[in-house]
């Protein structure tokens, strides 16, 4: 099936096996499919009478057919007459927070790797300011942190449209603050973020080490928290591992609930693939779903990229989706995306760069050259993979997580002052990425 029309034709074909040709002609001959989006089929008919008949007599049957086709729950929306114009106008109009569009809890696939963070996010959305404040969600890029963050905002907005919600990324907070100071609008900047009912902050790690930004954020945090309003923060690491974060911010972040998200298992990745495909109206075979899930293991965003590319193949090239199509899409996405190397690869390349033996690098040799090479390799594993401190330590004869953290922080400090270390890290990273 290469288009939304093909899917609607398939629905009519299956429906024709259950009702008479006369019924098909009477109620569906002038129906037009509008779109498939977010696990919802939208169709348009000429008048309200036909719309009501379609919904009441055939709606559940059509939803069942769609659910069977896409292997997930599907909804049907039937528009009549001028309702199509209103529908399209409503889609064009932005919400009070455009970033939240499309991010809802029902679109988030829950698995063992994220169920705690998901449950915490729902609890916060139901009782903002009263449960888990602040909520601090952390994990590597592309695992769904932003989805949960904005789903909280969407849920609270749907329930209480008058509540003031502010969303900002860590680096944008800095840029906006600097601009406000230059333009003499600092008070407006403070009002924008301090007088809100819900404060959503994405990628807070980017303010670490920026003293003036941290000071401003500290007072913003206090104002919102003391007013009993909700704060939700995401980061790529827990506060303890943000070496340059002010202690007063670290203690406040740790004073709420911290919830981590890990890479999803195979079953969850398959469910995510099916979900992303259904949202775009794309039917994938079980073999295609399994191939995607087996080959993209640590980044949900890459799965979404593959599905979007497959949709483009179907719509632009009028291409039938096959396993070869899937292989081509994965190759294209990973070529331009983030390739996650193995710890063995990183240790091998670091040892080769320093002209050292891999086993010595993993071992107990404490010579100066060996020590810095080991610290660099630990830093690279932490920044280039999804491994925890404990998992990294296991690669070095079971060193504990505090030893690993100390090594990583040592390299982070050297990167600020030692151009030779900066060059070394860049060169080794380049060597790894070129493999």
Image: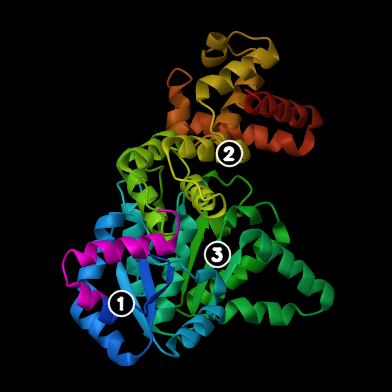
Q: Tell us which disc is closer to us: 3 or 1.
A: 1
Image location of residue 207, percent across then percent down: 65, 56
Q: Earlier in the sequence, mark 3 or mark 1?
A: 1
Q: Mark 2 or mark 3: which comes first in sequence?
A: 3
The residue positioned 36% from the left and 42% from the top of the image is 289
Which is nearer the eye, 20 or 143?
20
Q: Are marks 3 and 1 in contact (CB under 8 Å)?
A: no
What predominant SS class does the magenta segment belong to? helix
Q: Residues within 10 Å of mark 2 (few under 14, many from 20)?
A: some
The Cα–Cα distance between marks 3 and 1, rounded to whole angstroms, is: 47 Å
Q: Which residues are magenta?
A: 1-24
| Residue in the picture at 52% in, 68% down | 200
Above/below status of 190 relative to 287: below
Residue 135 seen in this snapshot: no
Relative to 203, residue 228 above or below = below
Q: Quadrant of the C terminus?
A: top right
Q: Determine if the magenta segment contains residue 17.
A: yes
Q: Residue at x 55, y 21 (%)?
A: 345
Question: What element does badge 1 sit on?
Answer: helix
Circle 3 sits on which residue? Answer: 201
Residue 31 is situated, as x and y percent measured from the top left of the image, at 36, 77
Q: Position of residue 140 (x, y in %)?
A: 50, 45
- Which mark is nearer the camera, 2 or 3? 2
Residue 332: mark: 2
From the top left corner, tell me how far across and down residue 65 is, in percent: 24, 62
Check disc 1 and report the residue beneath it: 28
Q: Which is nearer the N-term, disc 1 or disc 2?
A: 1
How packed mark 3 is, by other alpha carbons closer than 10 Å (few <14, some 14-19, many 20 or more), is many
């Amino acid at each position: 099936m290469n288009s939304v029309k093909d899917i609607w034709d398939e629905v009519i074909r299956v429906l024709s096996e259950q009702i008479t040709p006369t019924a098909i002609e009477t109620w569906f001959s002038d129906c037009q499919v509008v779109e498939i989006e977010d696990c919802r089929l939208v169709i348009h008919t000429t008048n309200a009478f036909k719309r009501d008949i379609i919904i009441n007599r055939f709606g559940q049957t059509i939803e069942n057919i769609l659910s069977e086709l896409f292997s997930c729950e599907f909804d049907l929306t039937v528009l009549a007459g001028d309702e199509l114009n209103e529908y399209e106008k409503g889609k064009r109009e932005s919400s009070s927070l455009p970033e939240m569009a499309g991010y809802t809890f029902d679109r988030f696939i829950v698995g063992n790797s994220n169920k705690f963070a998901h449950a915490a996010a729902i609890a916060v959305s139901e009782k903002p300011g009263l449960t888990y404040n602040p909520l601090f969600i952390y994990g590597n890029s592309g695992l769904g942190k932003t989805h949960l963050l904005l789903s909280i905002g969407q849920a609270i907005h749907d329930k209480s449209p008058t509540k003031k919600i502010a969303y900002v990324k860590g680096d944008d907070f800095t840029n906006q603050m600097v601009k406000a100071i230059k333009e003499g609008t600092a008070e407006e900047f403070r009002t924008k973020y301090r007088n809100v009912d819900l404060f959503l902050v994405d990628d807070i790690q980017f303010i670490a080490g920026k003293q003036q930004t941290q000071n401003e954020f500290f007072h913003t945090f206090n104002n919102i928290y003391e007013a009993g309003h909700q704060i939700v923060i995401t980061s790529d690491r827990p506060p303890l591992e943000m070496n340059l974060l002010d202690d007063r911010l670290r203690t406040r972040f740790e004073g709420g609930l911290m919830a981590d998200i890990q890479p999803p298992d195979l079953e969850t990745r398959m469910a995510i693939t099916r979900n992303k495909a259904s949202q775009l109206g794309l039917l994938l075979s079980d073999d295609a779903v399994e191939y995607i899930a087996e080959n993209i293991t640590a980044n949900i965003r890459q799965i979404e990229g593959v599905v979007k590319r497959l949709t483009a193949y179907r719509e632009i090239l009028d291409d039938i989706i096959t396993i070869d199509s899937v292989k081509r899409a994965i190759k294209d996405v990973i070529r331009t995306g983030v390739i996650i190397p193995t710890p063995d690869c990183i240790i091998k390349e670091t040892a080769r760069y320093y002209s050292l033996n891999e086993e010595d690098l993993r071992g107990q040799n404490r010579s100066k050259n060996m020590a810095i090479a080991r610290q660099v390799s630990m830093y690279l594993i932490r920044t280039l993979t999804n491994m925890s401190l404990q998992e990294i330590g296991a690669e070095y004869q079971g060193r504990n997580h505090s030893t690993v953290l100390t090594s990583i922080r040592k390299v982070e400090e050297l990167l600020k002052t030692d151009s030779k270390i900066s060059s070394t890290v860049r060169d080794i990273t380049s060597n790894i990425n070129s493999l």
